[in-house]
Amino acid sequence: MKIATWNVNSLTARWPRVEDWLRSRDVDVLLVQETKQTDAKFPFDALRDLGYESAHYGQGQWNGVAILSRVGLEDVVRGFGNDDPEARFIGATCGGIRVYSCYVPNGRALDNPHYQYKLEWLEELRRLLRTRPPDQLVVVGGDFNVAPSDLDVYDPSAFEGATHVSAQERAAIEGLLDTGLVDITREQHPDEPCFSWWDYRNGSFRRGWGLRIDLLLVDRELASRVRDSYVDRDARKGEKPSDHAPVIVEVNDV
């Protein structure tokens, strides 16, 4: 089974690229972030023509998360069940695996209220994962807006005092892993940057000025079956790409 996560930075703007990517990559499950669409605009029919069932949690021009699956899609949940009005979290069961698509708040600045919202959001996710059944296979993927270590940042000195690299954010990611999950791309490639995001400005992609902020966290049982996990850098090339590249995990049959 092949599972991927991809912040598409507007499914409306990126649909031709997403469609071509799905046709060429043989992906079974795709976790999508930043659809920036309402449910009414989401391309359910076009995805069905490609062989994918889909579930979407939309919010118009902001946020929006989705799950696309060609191995079944059941027991969909949208949001954490609290009063958060932002469309940042969706879960479903696909091919026997519980999958979650997450668009973690950016945080903006360390002294911004949005930073506290980010930490609280990550704590809500940790609570949910901590209470899952112990034998449940799970993949938690998405744009986490956190670079877990300095290896995940092209120049750590350029981010001193900024979000995405603060001790509290990194501790929150460790808290997710402590529920019994593995950061599978890093486990597979312990010494490679594996950047997944590059700013549109300053030729950042060409210069290699990236961050690894798109993560796939899997339970330890699934981790033992993984063949590889990698970033599809080719999807960041060409005309009008997302600023994020997909991250993929390949798992032996469940």
Image (spheres, rainbow, N blue to C red):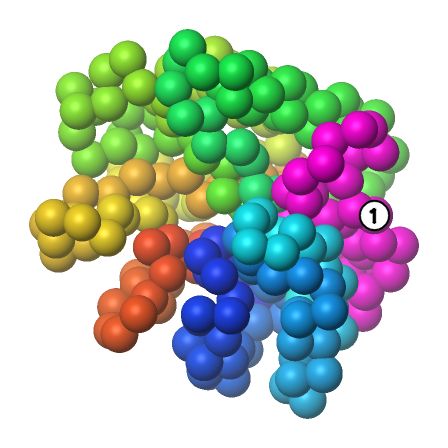
Report x, y in % for residue 3: 59, 61
Residue assigned mark 1: 77
Q: Residue at x 71, y 76 (%)?
A: 44
Q: Secondary structure at mark 1?
A: strand
User: What amino acid type should be assigned to the residue bearing mark 1?
Assistant: Val
Residue 7, compared with residue 15, is above or below; it is: above
Report x, y in % for residue 210: 24, 43
- Quarter holding residue 192: top left
Q: Is residue 122 visible?
A: yes
Instruction: Identify the residue at the far bottom of this view.
Output: 49
Q: Nearer the viewer, residue 17 or 134?
A: 17
**214 drawn magenta:** no
Report x, y in % for residue 43: 65, 76
Span colored in magenta: 72-101
Q: Nearer the viewer, residue 253 or 87?
A: 87
Compared across the picture, whether 246 is left or right of 99 comes to left
Residue 81, compared with residue 22, is above or below; it is: above
Q: Residue at x 55, y 35 (%)?
A: 104
- Quarter holding residue 241: bottom left
**73 drawn magenta:** yes
Q: Is residue 25 visible?
A: no
Q: Residue at x 48, y 54 (%)?
A: 7
- Where, quadrant-wise, is the C terminus in this rendering? bottom right
